[in-house]
Amino acid sequence: MAGAVKLDGAGAQKMKTIEEALHAMATINAIVERGAVEVKSQRPLGVIPQQIKRVAIPLQGQLKGQFGLIADQVAAFILSTTRGGGGDQAKIRSMREYVAQIRTALDIAANKVKEQHAVPIEISPD
């Protein structure tokens, strides 16, 4: 059975970071969608930006060491989310775009990690 691979130690640590980041992004996405429901009901966003910031700031710190460019995207997301100005509908659209960009970047990073840190497993025939 040829072709079996596993990740080396650094790769496993990076994948753990990516998995935790994807979990945080799922939480952020849920908050953004809750904000979209509020805006659709013609209610203000209220505390939604602060809730996003509360989840996103630790995420940015977590990504900074291994995935600096993605951490920069998260920082830009935090800034755009908490800034005043513009309508709530435009803010929701911007938040959704950032969530999609960051998720895509994390998926690409995961594929790179799998590619760069793959170690073949020797399987002896019985």
Image (cartoon, rainbow, N blue to C red):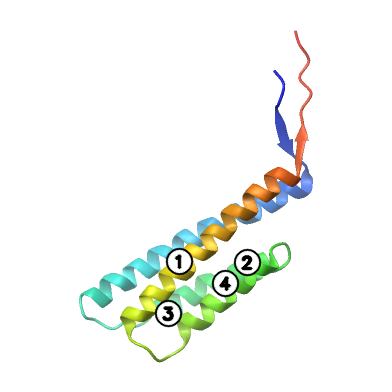
- Nearer to me, 13 or 3: 3
In three-dimensional space, the C-alpha distance between marks 2 and 1, rounded to whole angstroms, equals 15 Å
On the image, numbered disc 1 is attached to which residue? 28
Seen as rendered, the residue at the extreme top is: 126
Q: What percent of the width, then of the height, locates residue 6? A: 72, 35
On the image, numbered disc 3 is attached to which residue? 49
Seen as rendered, the residue at the extreme left is: 41
Residues marked 2 and 3 touching at CB (< 8 Å): no
On the image, numbered disc 2 is attached to which residue? 70
Q: What percent of the width, then of the height, locates residue 112? A: 68, 50
In three-dimensional space, the C-alpha distance between marks 3 and 1, rounded to whole angstroms, equals 10 Å
* Picture layout, residue 19 above or below residue 92: above
* Picture layout, residue 47 above or below residue 114: below
Specify the amino acid type for callout 1: Ile
On the image, numbered disc 4 is attached to which residue? 74
* Mark with earlier residue (2, 1): 1
Specify the amino acid type for callout 3: Pro
Q: What percent of the width, then of the height, locates residue 89? A: 31, 79
* Mark with earlier residue (2, 3): 3
Between tags 2 and 1, which lies in front? 2
Q: Is residue 54 visible?
A: yes
